[in-house]
Amino acid sequence: MKPLQMILANAARSDRKIVLSEGEDPRVIEAAIQSRKQKVARIVLVGDRETILKGLAAAGGSDLDGIEVHDPRDSSLKSEMSAKFHELRKHKGVTEADAETAILNPHIYAALLVKLGHADGTLGGATTATAEIVRSAIQVIGTAPDAKMVSSFFLMLLCKDYHEKKGALVFSDAGLVIDPTAAEMAEIAHAAAASLVHLTGETPRVAMLSFSTRGSAGGEKVSKVVEATQILRKMAPDMNVDGELQFDAAFVPSVASAKAPDSALGGNANVFIFPNLDTGNIAYKIAQRIGGAVAIGPILQGLAQPANDLSRGCDAEDILHMIAVTSAQC
């Protein structure tokens, strides 16, 4: 668990303010309380004020410093928020009246807190579909200047005694982009490698995954991965990347020596790029539920400021970890 401990410690040192847009949910409230007890981040809970205050009282968090409650209906920031949202979306036909209504949406409100500098990052998705979380973030926060797209990854931690390899892996995209083109797959890989460096400090070793290793199978789907690998090598000529590879050839040195003996990865990849969302999402859940890996995510990459999604199956500990990751991204 060393990578996670490092992320939690770094978050505590940075003392960021993170907005939780589903502040009424008991899991979110518990995560907020634990975040303050462990000094991971300062917290803003967004939602119905009375419900949140009752939840905090029931969970024993009423007296904790560093937890704010924002109800969009009576917020002192309503005028500033609606004006900003109108400015951002008027080119799409959003009127001032539309903006006043829109900011009552807790996810839009949370994103605006970040956009306007009242908070450092936002997190939601415990009770909301990914599409709404991502849409709110893109509409309000926008993409980073150097990013061509928004994608996601899971930070997979191998930390059990039975894990022969231990440490942090990145699985991408496992939560957002359904069927990337070769160029998009390369962009996802480039962003995922940077995300590994930012969160763990490790040097990325990138595997472009397929059901084929080095031409063992053919067809359009294999060709896409081959092309994506070529594009990525041109984008980042100094990056250690190989493809197309099956997962075992990317992860198991003995298999790599048999299937791809000249691979610079040598079966020791730590960034795994999937050809579509089916494979990425299924793989992370198998690694988590059968393999016992700790899965943190989906973590968004490519936004101008941190905004992250949660799995609807998350618990309070998962949310705490995501608060720390969001803080680390700031």
Image (cartoon, helix red, strand yellow):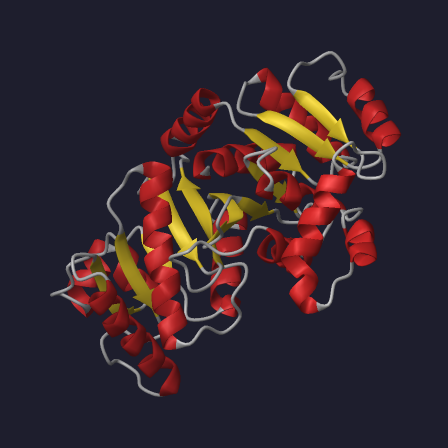
Q: Quadrant of residue 135?
A: bottom right
Residue 49 in the image: above or below residue 147? above
Q: Residue furthest right?
A: 50
Which is more toward the observer, 259 or 229?
229
Q: Residue furthest bottom?
A: 219
Q: Position of residue 247 (x, y in %)?
A: 34, 63
Q: Residue furthest left?
A: 262
Left or right: 88 with respect to 219?
Answer: right
Q: Quadrant of residue 78?
A: top right
The residue lying at 81 percent from left, 18 percent from top is 57
Left or right: 158 with respect to 39?
Answer: left
Left or right: 238 with respect to 297?
Answer: left
Residue 319 in the image: above or below residue 133? above
Would residue 108 be seen by someone viewing this image from the given angle?
Answer: no
Q: Residue furthest top?
A: 63
Left or right: 140 with respect to 195?
Answer: right
Which is more toward the observer, 263 or 104?
104
Q: Position of residue 1 (x, y in %)?
A: 41, 31
Q: Position of residue 168 (x, y in %)?
A: 36, 42
Number of disc labels:
0
The residue lying at 35 percent from left, 79 percent from top is 224
Q: Quadrant of residue 234?
A: bottom left
Q: Position of residue 167 (x, y in %)?
A: 34, 39
Which is more toward the observer, 191 or 294?
191
Would residue 299 be seen by someone viewing this image from the given angle?
Answer: yes
The residue lying at 61 percent from left, 42 percent from top is 123
